[in-house]
Image (cartoon, helix red, strand yellow):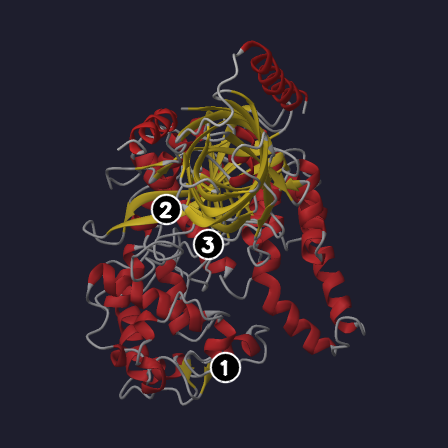
């Protein structure tokens, strides 16, 4: 006891002081309502000033080429990783999702009230995609929007999409207009909640909203414009790029043999998405897919396995969407002929389309015939034979996949853009056909085009008009690339091989030029960057 | 360092004053208990693995800044040659300095104060004293065990900026060996002055949680403490 008493006094002295606690981090939301920010404030992945961003991008050849198009960064960018709540195709499918909030930083023209660009990314088979992660050298689309928009004074908001990254949804609602536009609006709400709480709070939202996206994201952007207008939300302008807007027409073109590059990736993403949404696409995957690939194809994409590995290991064919032994439809020689492998030597796209036929193939002939028969019975107004006047979608498709295309075709909904809209693409795009999609939408909205509310831009057309420098830049870049492929440094390819290489990269090559056009278009309407 | 010198001089001055002012007790008086108070100069000798986890550039490391704090101790005489000492310090606010790249992204890092924490770090020594108990000057050596817990852990604004946002820090507690060597001088009666040099081993795992993103490192401290103190025996 004589020892313990004085010892107790000493310990008490010390322990009185020992009543601290750790500093806190962000707060997790206690609700999962769509649009709720899941972590507030969000995590900042990186903070780069203008010089550091330029230096980081300039270290790679592709980054340097990108900067040559976007221009040198005028602002620094803080890259935030947003986590938010949304829903899948069904209202019961609550899921956490993630994306990017890119905030311009620096001096005048970068901070203070700034406009928001809401961006939707293109198809990506990488399930781990995080477009906010500027430190990932494979995140080329994140670098593109950072350099093009955020580094020029726009706040950028972009989802990774449900089914990617941290989302526990077991599939991606690919080209589901309702889900994806809803998710875009959800991340916008979450980002607007987050912005004042970030480490970049000197930059604020000025209320202007620009909506854009590329490829899959082009479809998402146009669907989002429709949803925002329906919700009477403020939208300043939109610039959907290279999107499969007229989805039914695009599907018809494809099933009639105009097979696009990338179709063997898009097919499983589409059927899985629509099976989850509508439950009627197939009873078994073998209804659609050949036995070679049917097993497990409903969970194949997106994947953490690189797409080239999926091709190499026989889980997907690289290009052979259809059986090279095409179907014979009894009593219907015209349909049989329409489903034959394309062989028109006068059509420059024939070699491209023929890549879509082979063995082993992905989609069985019976399924192809069922789709085509519905298209014959209830034709689309644009494909295969453009009808006079406005190219309407079919009246009421009964084939379930075609009906899903119809439901998500952006000609649906008796609507038209009410804000300035730029529809940009590349006229020779082998992945998302320009004529079937961009031109069909322009033809669908002739009054808005005539009133110059809608502007259509083919970056591959003869340069003229307000975007002629961008068109000239794209054409020159394609010519330079062709020359490079023919040179020793580029592999010394023959002209046909070099041209094939050019076709393969065409869809991706259009993206920075259309994005530049979108920024130029937005700048005219923005009270922020000029 | 000025502060450290001032504290040490104060303690030395107080000891000298007591030597003059306090009446001497009988030289052969033996006391069972003793309290000591003085100054602790702590040199942390930090060695840490680089911070590991998502979104951390290579080479991000840190070190604890050396400091001085109040020393208090309780000593129990066991025999004429052996004491047991419980050495405590007023839990010091240890500041942690970023080491590694000059910037993380564009955020300054190297040399910035990125966090702080208080140490509750008692050490129990068994000490052997040389020379007879009647000697004025008695060198001693000791060995023991140190327990360290961290609290009041704060990531600074600069730390938060480097790590990506408000950050919660946690450090595991540590139990490790300790050793000491020093000398005591009987000033007069109940009063003594002491100086000693101690070393211990502290291991901790640190976790930094920033908006659910966790980064970790393992830290080894080899804190060495120079103590100058005044003791009162009774």
Residue farthest along the right direction in this orientation: A488
Q: Earlier in the sequence, mark 1 or mark 2?
A: 2
- Left or right relative to A21: residue A145: right
- Mark 3 lies on residue: A243
- Mark 1 lies on residue: A312
Percent position (x, y) of residue A317? Answer: 45, 80
Q: What element carries label 2?
A: helix
Q: Which quadrant would the C terminus of chain A be assigned to in this image?
A: top right
Determine the residue positioned at 60% across, 63% down.
Answer: A506
| Callouts 3 and 1 in the same chain | yes
Determine the residue positioned at 34% across, 85% down.
Answer: A333
Given residues B125 and A219, the one toward you in this image is B125
Q: Are marks 1 and 2 in contact (CB under 8 Å)?
A: no
Distance CA(mark 2)–CA(mark 3): 10 Å
- Mark 2 lies on residue: A223
Question: Which of the two marks, 1 or 2, is nearer to us in this view?
Answer: 1
Label 1, residues with CA under 10 Å away: few <14, some 14-19, many ≥20 = few
Q: What element carries label 1?
A: helix
Q: Earlier in the sequence, mark 2 or mark 3?
A: 2
Distance CA(mark 3)–CA(mark 1): 28 Å
Label 3, residues with CA under 10 Å away: few <14, some 14-19, many ≥20 = many
Q: Tell me, for residue A265, which label it has, or none.
A: none
Residue A177 appears in view:
yes
Q: Which quadrant would the N terminus of chain A be assigned to in this image?
A: top left
Based on the displayed image, in which of its 4 quarters is residue B162 positioned? Answer: top right
Label 2, residues with CA under 10 Å away: few <14, some 14-19, many ≥20 = many
């Amino acid at each position: 006891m004589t020892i313990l008493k004085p010892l107790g006094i000493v310990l008490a002295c010390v322990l009185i002081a020992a009543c601290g606690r750790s500093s806190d981090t962000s707060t997790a939301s206690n609700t999962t309502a769509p649009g709720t920010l899941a972590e507030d404030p969000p995590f900042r992945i990186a903070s780069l000033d203008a010089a550091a961003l330029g230096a980081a991008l300039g270290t790679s050849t592709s980054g340097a080429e990108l900067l040559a198009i976007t221009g040198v960064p005028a602002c620094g960018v803080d890259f935030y990783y947003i986590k938010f709540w949304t829903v899948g195709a069904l209202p019961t499918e609550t899921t956490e999702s993630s994306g990017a909030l890119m905030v311009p930083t620096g001096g005048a023209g970068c901070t203070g009230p700034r406009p928001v660009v809401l961006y939707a990314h293109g198809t990506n088979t990488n399930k781990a995609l995080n477009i906010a992660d500027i430190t990932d050298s494979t995140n080329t689309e994140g670098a593109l929007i950072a350099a093009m928009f955020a580094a020029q004074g726009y706040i950028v908001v972009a989802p990774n999409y449900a089914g990617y990254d941290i989302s526990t949804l077991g599939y991606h609602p690919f080209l589901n207009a309702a889900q994806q536009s809803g998710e875009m609006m959800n991340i916008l709400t979450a980002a607007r909640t987050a912005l004042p709480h970030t480490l970049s709070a000197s930059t604020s939202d000025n209320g202007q909203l620009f909506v854009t996206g590329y490829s899959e994201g082009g479809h998402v952007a146009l669907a989002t414009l429709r949803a925002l207008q329906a919700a009477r939300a403020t939208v300043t302008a939109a610039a959907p790029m290279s999107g499969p807007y007229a989805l039914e027409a695009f599907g018809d073109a494809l099933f009639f043999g105009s097979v696009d590059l990338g179709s063997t990736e898009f097919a499983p993403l589409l059927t899985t998405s629509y099976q989850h949404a509508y439950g009627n696409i197939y009873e078994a995957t073998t209804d659609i897919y050949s036995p070679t690939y049917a097993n497990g194809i409903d969970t194949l994409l997106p994947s953490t396995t690189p797409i080239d590995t999926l091709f190499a290991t026989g889980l997907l064919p690289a290009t052979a969407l259809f059986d090279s032994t095409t179907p014979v439809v009894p009593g219907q020689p015209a349909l049989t002929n329409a489903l034959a492998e394309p062989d028109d030597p006068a059509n420059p796209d024939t070699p491209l389309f023929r890549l879509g036929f082979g063995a082993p193939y992905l989609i069985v002939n019976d399924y192809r015939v069922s789709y085509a028969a519905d298209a014959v019975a209830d034709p689309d107004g644009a494909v295969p034979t453009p009808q006079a006047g406005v190219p309407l979608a079919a009246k009421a498709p009964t084939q379930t996949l075609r009906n899903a295309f119809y439901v998500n075709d952006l000609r649906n909904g008796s609507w038209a853009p009410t804000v300035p809209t730029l529809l940009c693409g590349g006229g020779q795009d082998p992945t998302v056909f320009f004529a079937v999609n961009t031109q069909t939408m322009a033809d669908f909205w002739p009054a808005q085009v005539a009133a110059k509310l809608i502007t259509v831009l083919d970056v591959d057309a003869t340069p003229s008009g307000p975007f002629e420098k961008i068109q000239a830049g794209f054409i020159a870049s394609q010519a330079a690339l062709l020359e490079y492929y023919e040179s020793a440094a580029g592999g010394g390819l023959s002209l046909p091989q070099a041209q094939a290489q050019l076709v393969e990269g065409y869809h991706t090559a259009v993206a920075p030029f259309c994005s530049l056009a979108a920024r130029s278009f937005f700048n005219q309407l923005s009270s922020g960057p000029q | 360092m000025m502060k450290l010198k001032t504290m040490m001089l104060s303690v030395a001055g107080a000891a000298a004053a007591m030597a003059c002012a306090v009446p001497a007790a009988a030289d052969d008086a033996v006391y069972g208990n003793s309290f000591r108070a003085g100054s602790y100069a702590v040199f942390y000798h930090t060695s840490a693995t680089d911070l590991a986890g998502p979104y951390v550039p290579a080479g991000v490391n840190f070190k604890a800044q050396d400091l001085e704090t109040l020393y208090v101790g309780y000593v129990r005489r066991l025999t004429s040659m052996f004491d047991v000492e419980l050495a405590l310090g007023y839990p010091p606010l240890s500041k942690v300095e970023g080491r590694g790249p000059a910037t993380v992204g564009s955020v300054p890092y190297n040399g910035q104060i990125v966090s702080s924490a208080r140490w509750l770090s008692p050490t129990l020594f068994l000490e052997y004293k040389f020379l007879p108990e009647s000697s004025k000057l008695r060198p001693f050596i000791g060995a023991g065990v140190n327990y360290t817990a961290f609290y009041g852990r704060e990531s600074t604004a600069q730390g938060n900026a480097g790590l990506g946002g408000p950050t919660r820090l946690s450090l595991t507690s540590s139990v490790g060996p300790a050793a000491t060597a020093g000398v005591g001088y009987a000033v007069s009666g109940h009063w003594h002055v002491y100086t000693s040099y101690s070393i211990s081993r502290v291991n901790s795992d640190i976790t930094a949680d920033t908006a659910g993103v966790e980064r970790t490192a393992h830290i080894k401290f080899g804190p060495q403490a120079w103590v100058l103190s005044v003791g009162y025996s009774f």
